[in-house]
Image (spheres, coloured by chain):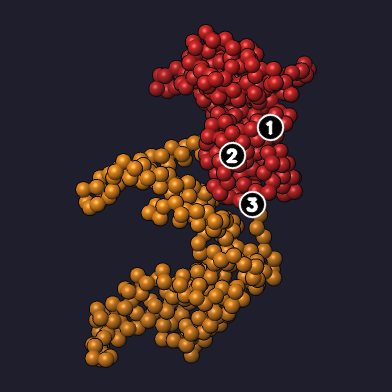
């Protein structure tokens, strides 16, 4: 992965800590940076604070200490619209993400909210749907699509905003193997920084050369995905378990990079 | 809805994005911009309601006008008449009026009926039927989505339009959730028989409400993440030419002429 050294990192998180109003502390000082064009997996057991971290990336949650910077722009009240355009979050349940009556209107929602109109808006919608291979479903209502198709449209809704970084929350959940592979092909073909939150470890290995492990509100490890998955003690310490019969050492050669 | 089970759901899906009242077609009426049709239907109903009930011939003329619209829209009479059945509860009320109303009475077939009650029943029946028929025609020639765009164009408060559009989007999702809960109940041997089981059904309804509420919160989060700040961005601007407006308003204008004649004659 060759990052362009002149441009600022896509995402820079420093000393991020956060406690919910009820006193539950979810993040205890998180630090990491993701360079432009990288694909990084954020691994962690349930309750490690992954969702809390994701909601900080576009300023939905704030008020703790530390900073988040997206391509040089600090996340904060004054640039909220621009931050939300730059950080595209794909939520886990596509039924939550796709809230408009047709696929086309849903994909158009983000850019239209940013002020795009007419032919320019239409072109943006077509391009985003083309990237995920869903152009022919443009005028269909989202609830008549299969689950895998809905997930792909959900990715398109975010791509239409031409984000700096694509954040995916459990992208492989509920997908059958074919849809899983199709989504992987799409994600690999995109020219965008990707942060993928998951506990699907084979998927992380397939798509992301680098991984972060978030555990108990801190980054417990940061390194090559293949190395992390091969470290049994580390994995066990953070309740990360590989599926039966899966050995990262034997599959690692065919993946990684572009 | 949930009682239908798997097969009915499939057919609901096959019906596509349209609602059950909608009848797909390419007639001139289908092609009119939605807000012109909404305005025309509303104006027509207002005119019908303000016609004096004694001018019985006027109501016959209104029915003829609607018949012409249905013909132009290629909506078959059978389809239209079946959809009219929805007014039966109101008709039942109208039928009671001649029996219960006070005042001068006449004997019809050995029954003593009130004259003012008969007029009242006729009034409700005629105006109600015409209003429902006009609405059914509107619904069968306009897609739900287009109706919402029309309402938006006619400056209905945006919040109401948003609520209605979310109802369309999430109706199926919530029905599906309800169906899954019913299957889960029945799989564990539960069958609703009699009053003792109402508690279980009430708890299911409560759970469904909470699930929908939580979904609402998640949807809001997704909207905010894509730049929502209280107003829906305008994606499709519906516009109507002068010709389309005048075409749509032919119906209420013709009705207005009939109405004025009804008042003067």
Chain given the colour red: A
Q: Is residue A154 left or right of residue B207?
A: right
Kindly tell me whether residue A166 is visible in this rendering: yes
Q: Is residue A81 left or right of residue B263?
A: right
Kindly tell me whether residue B46 is visible in this rendering: no
| Image quarter of the N terminus of chain A | top right
User: Residue A165, position in %: x, y?
Assistant: 66, 27
Q: Residue at x 50, y 73 (%)?
A: B80
Whether B194 is drawn above or below B60: the answer is above
User: Residue A189, position in %: x, y?
Assistant: 72, 31
Q: Which residue is mark 2?
A: A148
User: Residue A23, position in %: x, y?
Assistant: 40, 19
Structural crowding at the residue carrying mark 2, measured as other residues with C-alpha within 10 Å and reported as few (<14), some (14–19) or many (≥20): many
Do the CB atoms of the residues marked 1 and 3 lie less than 8 Å apart?
no
Circle 3 sits in a helix, a strand or a loop, which is it? loop
Q: Earlier in the sequence, mark 1 or mark 3?
A: 3
Q: Which residue is mark 1?
A: A185
Q: Earlier in the sequence, mark 2 or mark 3?
A: 3
Q: Which residue is mark 3?
A: A139
């Amino acid at each position: 992965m060759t990052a362009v050294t002149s441009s600022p990192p896509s995402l820079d998180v420093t000393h991020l800590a956060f406690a919910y109003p009820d006193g539950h502390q979810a993040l205890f000082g998180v630090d990491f940076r993701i360079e432009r064009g990288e694909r990084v997996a954020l691994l962690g057991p349930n309750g490690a604070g992954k969702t809390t971290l994701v909601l900080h990336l576009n300023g939905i949650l704030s008020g703790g200490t530390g900073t988040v910077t997206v391509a040089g722009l600090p996340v904060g009240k004054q640039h909220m619209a621009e931050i939300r355009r730059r950080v595209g979050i794909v939520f886990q349940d596509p039924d939550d993400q796709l809230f408009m009556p047709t696929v086309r209107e849903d994909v158009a929602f983000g850019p239209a909210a940013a002020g795009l109109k007419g032919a320019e808006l239409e072109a943006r919608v077509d391009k985003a749907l083309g990237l995920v291979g869903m152009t022919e479903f443009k005028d269909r209502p989202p609830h008549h699509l299969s689950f895998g198709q809905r997930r792909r449209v959900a990715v398109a809704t975010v791509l239409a905003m031409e984000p700096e970084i694509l954040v995916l929350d459990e992208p492989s959940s509920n997908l059958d193997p074919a849809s899983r592979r199709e989504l992987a092909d799409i994600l690999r073909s995109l020219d965008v920084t990707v942060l993928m939150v998951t506990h699907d470890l084979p998927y992380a290995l397939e798509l992301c050369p680098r991984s972060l492990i978030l555990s108990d509100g801190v980054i417990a490890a940061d390194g090559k995905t293949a190395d992390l998955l091969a470290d049994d003690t580390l994995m066990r310490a953070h309740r990360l378990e590989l599926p039966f019969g899966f050995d990262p050492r034997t599959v690692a050669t065919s993946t990684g990079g572009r | 809805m949930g009682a239908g089970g798997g097969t009915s759901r499939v057919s609901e899906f096959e019906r596509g994005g349209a609602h059950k009242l909608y009848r797909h077609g390419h007639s001139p009426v289908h092609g009119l911009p939605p807000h012109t049709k909404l305005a025309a239907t509303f104006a027509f109903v207002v005119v019908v309601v303000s016609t004096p009930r004694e001018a019985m011939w006027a109501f016959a003329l209104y029915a003829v006008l609607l018949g012409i619209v249905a013909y132009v829209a290629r909506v078959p009479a059978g389809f239209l008449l079946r959809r009219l059945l929805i007014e039966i509860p109101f008709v039942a009320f109208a039928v009671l009026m001649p029996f219960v109303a006070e005042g001068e009475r006449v004997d019809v077939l050995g029954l003593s009926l009130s004259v003012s009650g008969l007029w009242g029943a006729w009034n409700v029946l005629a105006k109600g039927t015409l209003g429902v028929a006009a609405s059914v025609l509107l619904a069968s020639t306009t897609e739900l989505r287009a109706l919402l765009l029309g309402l938006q164009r006619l400056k209905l408060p945006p919040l109401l339009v948003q609520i209605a559009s979310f109802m369309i989007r999430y109706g199926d999702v919530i029905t599906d959730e309800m169906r899954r809960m019913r299957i889960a109940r029945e799989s564990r041997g539960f069958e609703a028989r009699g009053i003792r089981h109402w508690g279980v059904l009430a708890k299911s309804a409560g759970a469904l409400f909470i699930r929908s509420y939580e979904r609402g919160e998640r949807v809001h989060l997704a909207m905010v993440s894509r730049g929502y700040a209280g107003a829906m961005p305008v994606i499709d601007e519906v516009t109507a030419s002068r010709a389309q407006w005048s075409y749509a308003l032919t119906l209420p204008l013709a009705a207005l002429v009939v109405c004025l004649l009804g008042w003067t004659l």
